[in-house]
Image (tube, helix red, strand yellow):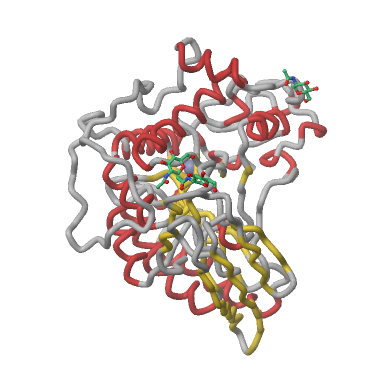
Amino acid sequence: MYLKLSVIAALVAVATAAPSTTTTAAATPSSVAAPIIPLPPFSGTLVGAYPTQDKIAPTDTPLVKQWLAELNLTSVATWPVVPFTAGGDPQNPKAIPEAACDWTETNCINKDITTCPLGVWGLTYDDGPTEFSGKLYDFLDTTDQKATLFYIGSNVVENPALARRACGAGHQIAVHTWSHNPSTSLTNEQFIAEIKYTEMAIKELCGFTPRYFRPPYGDIDDRIRGLLWAMGYTSVIWDYDTNDWMMAPGGTRTMAQVDAAFAQWIAVAPTDKTGHVTLEHELYANTVAAAIENLPKIQATWKAMPVSACINDAHPYHETNITLATMNGAKAGISTGNTTASATVSVGGATATSSAGSSTASGSADHSTSAGTVSNVVSSSVTVMAAAAAVALGQMLF
Ligand SMILES: *[C@@H]1O[C@H](CO)[C@@H](O)[C@H](O)[C@H]1NC(C)=O
Ligand SMILES: *[C@@H]1O[C@H](CO)[C@@H](O)[C@H](O)[C@H]1NC(C)=O
Ligand SMILES: *[C@@H]1O[C@H](CO)[C@@H](O)[C@H](O)[C@H]1NC(C)=O
Ligand SMILES: [Zn+2]
């Protein structure tokens, strides 16, 4: 079943229609804590040459030609590009073979992340940053809660101060295309341009390059996955959909309906076989309100954290001197000297390697289920050994 793409596209256009590229250096509120992840200087105006906002990224620029030349696409599957109708469905679904592993058509998964471990809630918000994001980030800060934010490149260049705030706070920043079109409706060249321009904006503003991607509408097949793998990406879908996007102004979904969805998931949590990855949006005032209303309930039932944290990937960016907090005890921060030292981090038998300078960490995670709640206890001890490099680590924060 497909979402009504035209409806969403129209609403996204409304949400992003504010005068753009006037990148007012909107100062982050003075109450915002100093960044955990240091940010590059920013004058208030982006210097990169970016495509028109909310339009499919062009493929004929020197930059795109350079990116294409740098990629090896020989093993990318050749499934057809499928144009979509204005109503948000593939024009010809029969053109999509089952072997293409198209998620929206058949729920087919191929190395996509769709869940977190039992007792853990992968907290994600899509389509930001928007004018409503500041309120969400304020609320997340009040409980030291970190999330995965799947950013639309067009919105990043429109709201640079909000993007920088989230980057510095240690949220996991990830890519959600430049223009929010269905991935399988784009040519290889268009899709690559959409990813790389979004990367470029995040790199300019935040100093790092994401390695995680969520397809708009969950629209992904093995051709798109092949392009993502060639660019070093892991794709993230979801298993629990709040359908909060229908809370758009003029939309049909009420707060009570979103609350009811959460209530239902919480009710069955004691019999969960896995943890979850959610789909929520920082796109409208209503969706941010729903996110804020329901986050405490999530936190009371699961251990909530970014997707990278739940799979213990301390390095969700290509710049491996940046570490984000993980469930197994890695701490958010940046190494400021040699990054040659690495540390093995173990949690209950699982191991992960962290190159956060010369820190070592050990911890244990215990998921216990009782009377309607799942509690996840993460304990860790971290030893930071003196080494050649000075290592500055922030607090362990999700
Ligand atoms: C491109 O990747 C293929 C395998 O997918 C490999 O055989 C080939 O050598 C690579 N080409 C270059 C130029 O690296
Ligand atoms: C982190 O590494 C990148 C290269 O990957 C480098 O440009 C940047 O300056 C480094 N940051 C710090 C604080 O060392
Ligand atoms: C990194 O370590 C190497 C060898 O241990 C040393 O020669 C180099 O100066 C160090 N670099 C920094 C930036 O500390
Ligand atoms: Zn989206």
Looking at this rendering, what residue extends furthest in the bottom direction?
371
Q: Is residue 353 above or below residue 179?
A: below
Q: Give the residue at x 44% y 54%.
A: 334
Front position in the image: 288 or 167: 167
Q: Is residue 1 left or right of residue 202?
A: right
* Image point (53%, 13%), residue name: 65
- Percent x, y of residue 239: 64, 57
Taking depth in this image into account, of 67 and 76 the one nearest to the observer is: 67
- The image quarter in which residue 43 lies: top left
Where 60 falls versus 86 (above or below)? above
Which quadrant of the view contains residue 41?
Answer: top left
Q: Quadrant of ligand 1?
A: top right
**Closer to the camera, 247 or 193?**
193
Residue 55 at x, y = what percent? 41, 23
Furthest residue in direction right, as rendered = 99
Q: Residue at x 58, y 80 (%)?
A: 377
Q: Is residue 323 left or right of residue 84?
A: left
Total marks in image: 0
Q: Residue at x 74, y 72 (%)?
A: 349
Which quadrant is home to the N terminus?
Answer: top right
Residue 241 in view of the camera: no
Up-down relation of residue 275 to residue 124 (above or below): below
Question: Can residue 170 be seen by looking at this rendering?
Answer: yes
The location of residue 80, given as percent across then percent down, is 71, 21
Residue 185 location (% of width, % of height): 59, 25
